[in-house]
Image (cartoon, rainbow, N blue to C red):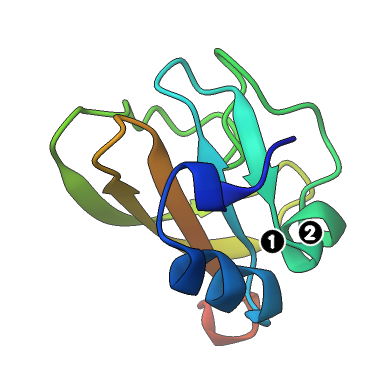
């Protein structure tokens, strides 16, 4: 995986690396380009084209758009996702585990 500094400015790279929530950069085809330690710890399954980190929820990555949604990871935890298109066409993804707040 490459450093997001090649995809975004160095300030973003520094913040993402230290952020306690999972953050990563996906290429336009869904290939994982970079992930912080929290992302790698939370999502251990293969991530790539046709296998997004948010599991089977069909959330297409749309160029020039940003979206927020909730989806379960393959291990059943519920995450609130934020997906933002970067100027390069890649996607900055951030997730927050809301499992403990979800209705049972």
Mark 1 and mark 2: span between their CA atoms? 10 Å
| Residue 39 point in image, percent of width and height | 72, 58
Whether residue 58 is visible: yes
Q: Is residue 67 above or below residue 103?
A: above
Tell me: 88 left or right of 43.
Answer: left
Label 1: how many residues lie within 10 Å, few (<14), some (14-19) or many (20+)?
some
Vertically, is 31 above or below 13?
A: above
Mark 1 in CB contact with mark 2 (< 8 angstroms): yes
In-front residue for pair 15/30: 15
Q: Which residue is mark 2?
A: 42
* Residue located 69% across and 28% down the image: 47
Q: Quadrant of residue 50?
A: top right
Residue at position x 24%, y 40% in the image: 87
On residue 67, the disc is: none
Which secondary structure lies at badge 2? helix
Residue 74: x percent and y percent?
A: 73, 41
Work out which quarter of the rendered image holds the C terminus and state it: bottom right
At x 49% / y 51%, what residue is drawn?
71
Q: Position of residue 97 (x, y in %)?
A: 61, 73
| Residue 98 can be seen, yes or no | no
Number of dots carrying numbers: 2
Of residues 10 and 1, the one nearer the viewer is 10
- Percent position (x, y) of residue 55? 60, 35
The reply, left or right, for residue 18 in relation to residue 95 is right
Q: Quadrant of residue 17?
A: bottom right
* Residue located 63% across and 80% down the image: 19
In primary-sequence order, the first of circles 1 and 2 is 2
Q: Which quadrant is home to the N terminus?
A: top right
Q: Which residue is mark 1?
A: 77
Element on which disc 1 rests: loop
């Amino acid at each position: 995986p490459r450093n997001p500094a090649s995809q975004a400015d160095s300030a973003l790279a520094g913040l993402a690396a230290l952020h306690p929530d999972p953050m990563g950069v996906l290429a336009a085809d869904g290939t994982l380009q970079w992930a912080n330690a929290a992302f790698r710890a939370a999502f251990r399954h293969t991530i790539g084209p046709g296998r997004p980190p948010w599991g089977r929820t069909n959330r297409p990555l749309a160029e020039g758009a940003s979206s927020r949604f909730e989806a379960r990871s393959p291990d059943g935890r519920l995450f609130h996702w934020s997906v933002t298109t970067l100027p390069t066409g890649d996607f900055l993804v951030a997730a927050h585990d809301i499992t403990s707040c979800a209705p049972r």
